[in-house]
Amino acid sequence: MTKRQKIISVILLALVYAAVFVMEQVIPAQAMLFTVLKKGAIYALVAVSMNLLNGFTGLFSLGQAGFMLIGAYVYGIFTIPTEMRTSVYQYFDGGVIQFTVPVLLAIVLAGVAAAIAAALIGFPALRLKSDYLAIATLGFAEILRAIFQWDKLGPVTNGSNLLRKFPTFNDFNITNADGDVVIYLSTLVPFLIVGVCIFLIVLLINSSYGRVFRAIRDDERAAEAMGVNLFAHKEISFVVSSFFAGIGGALLAMYQMTIQASAFKSAMTYEILLIVVIGGIGSVTGSCIGSFLFIAASEWWLRGLDSGTFLGITAPTIFRSGFRKVVFAVIIMVIVLFYRKGLMGDKEFSVARIAGRFRRLFRRRAPAEKGATK
Amino acid sequence: MSENVLRIENLTMRFGGVTAVDALSLDVNRGEIVALIGPNGAGKTTAFNCITGVYEQTDGKIRFLGKDIKRGTTPDKITKLGIARTFQNIRLFKSMTVFENVLVAKHMRTKQNVFSATLRFNRNEEKRVRRETEELLDKQGLLHLKDEVASNLPYGLQRHLEIARALATDPQIILLDEPAAGMNPQETQELAGFIQQIRDEYKLTVFIIEHHMDLIMQISDRIYVLDFGALIASGSPAEVQSNQRVIDAYLGVVEDA
Ligand SMILES: Nc1ncnc2c1ncn2[C@@H]1O[C@H](COP(=O)(O)OP(=O)(O)OP(=O)(O)O)[C@@H](O)[C@H]1O
Ligand SMILES: [Mg+2]
């Protein structure tokens, strides 16, 4: 990137954040827009972290939901205020943990816990052929869901009961003495956290390590012959990816306000995988754009389908309340079939490319106009 | 007698019932260009793969600079010791640029970890590596192709880039597996000069597999001939060329082809 492109990118990003801030102050907080922005940002982070592994290192993991589950639980367990614990852990005598840590620290801990779990799984799985990672992580995520609901661990995880009353995005809002919100920050702060995380991933991708990841993806044998310790670098990529999935899990907990292990199904992993594919495998900006489009479509734009009417069309009764999913599946099939490389391919969204496209468009038009005057 | 760089003793590699390399012993000394020739399927590439740790040999010893390379040493560790290689079927990082291909080879010798690299704590290290890579590409006459994606290069240049990338690992010895494959006579002639040039410039030792006999006879100090995994002859180009067993097993065949 040239200096000018960098400046333009920074300005664009600043504008996005400014727009989020302004919208948050003027649009009612219950608006669907904020659901999409919050959840979209969280999924964008997890999708980018999956892309790091999948698109940039060529490793296939299906453990995202599992690492998010760990992140969510670690966040919840360490942030529920001590005075609330008796009511949350009502069947477990208030639970064993009787302290809290600051929210930001808890979010980091959520990532660290997921990273440690990844390191342990990676140790055997990454030494085997690449396909084993997908199987190992998928199995791990399934088992984890059961473990976290296990009664014996109730004093820590609350068993199959909800974790709740921990700080959520709404606690980022600034209130006055009466409890009225003066400044809304419940969308901006998660946006900032996600922004910092994605920025770190981009820095990693553009570092010497990122280059080695891509080398491994292109040709393992050649990478090894260049002195690259395959296991060590795969492990790094996997651990970093899982770290950010863990943070994504913590953020998802904050967004949903409650945590329940049964919600972190493999369907969640597949949603994220879809976002990566739709956005383009190997494109960070693709994953971000894909995430917001995916969440907007599934949570908002296609909502009308379930209630029977959509764009003025009334759906046949048999489709009601499941119709959204049908249409959604068809859209995704079309994208995967006809845009095999996703929205962005492995390219990044850049101002220079768009400017170049416009320039070419005008150049093509110019001679045609001349021709018309003759 | 000059210093020994690579010594192979009784190297044997079996795949199930197939003995691809059969009790092979050979020496490569500092500054030499040594060739390994033989008909298709003779076990030449397999020997290279054992030396570079791609395969664990069934039996035998591999010594590098007087030290045993333990069986099961991984390829990356062997590269770090100073043994570089190219592949019979070109193995570049296809989606990466010429510049990046060489940068990857420099990664293992940089002083950094994932945190310092991500957070840009030590920009000088990255700068140094980039400068060295530019110098290397410049010397190789590839600098103008720096930002070209590797898979877009013409075949001959891909071969050249693969050698440049191997040189970037700072090797003592370089193993070239059929570097002239697919080249026309003129390109092959240029390659001959190029191999001698890098040997002198980087004080390298060269161990080369090739089917182009003109090239081999022109640049090799010594030649080993392999047939069905076993050594059938060795010596100077003149000695090997006049060896009846070699003519029967290999050289005669090449002329027919
Ligand atoms: N991984 C493997 N598994 C089973 N057999 C193998 C393997 N690698 C090589 N072989 C066998 O070992 C023998 C030697 O193969 P190798 O590739 O070393 O020959 P080569 O001398 O390099 O031939 P060429 O000149 O065609 O490159 C062949 O019979 C081959 O089929
Ligand atoms: Mg071969």
Image (cartoon, coloured by chain):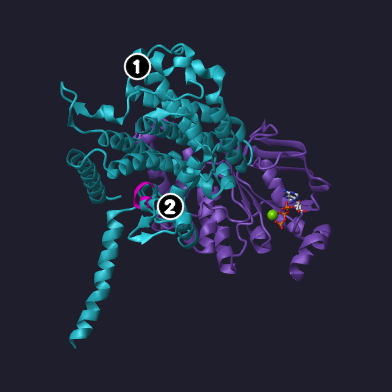
Chain colours: A cyan, B purple
Question: Is-magenta flag for residue A170?
Answer: no
Which of the marked residues, 2 or 1, is nearer the chain's N terminus?
A: 1
Residue located beneath label 1 in the image? A81
Mark 1: secondary structure: loop
Give the residue number, with chain letter if any, for mark 2.
A324
Q: Give the residue furthest to the bottom.
A: A374
**Image-quadrant location for residue A188:** top left
Our reading of the magenta stretch's main secondary structure is helix
Vertical relation: A279 (above or below) A361 = above
Residue A28, position as x, y percentages in the image: 21, 40
**For residue B225, side relative to residue A328 (left or right):** right
**Which stretch did the figure color magenta?**
A299-303
Distance from disc 2 to disc 1, alpha carbons, whole Å, reads 39 Å
Which of the two residues, A97 or B250, is positioned nearer the viewer here? A97
Q: Does the stretch in magenta take in A302?
A: yes
User: Quadrant location of the C terminus of chain A?
Assistant: bottom left
The chain that hosts pointer 1 is: A
Visible in this render: residue A236?
A: no
Picture quadrant where residue B220 is located:
bottom right
Tell me the mark number nearer the camera, choosing from 2 and 1.
Answer: 2
- Crowding around mark 1 (Cα neighbors within 10 Å: few <14, some 14 to 19, many 20+) is some
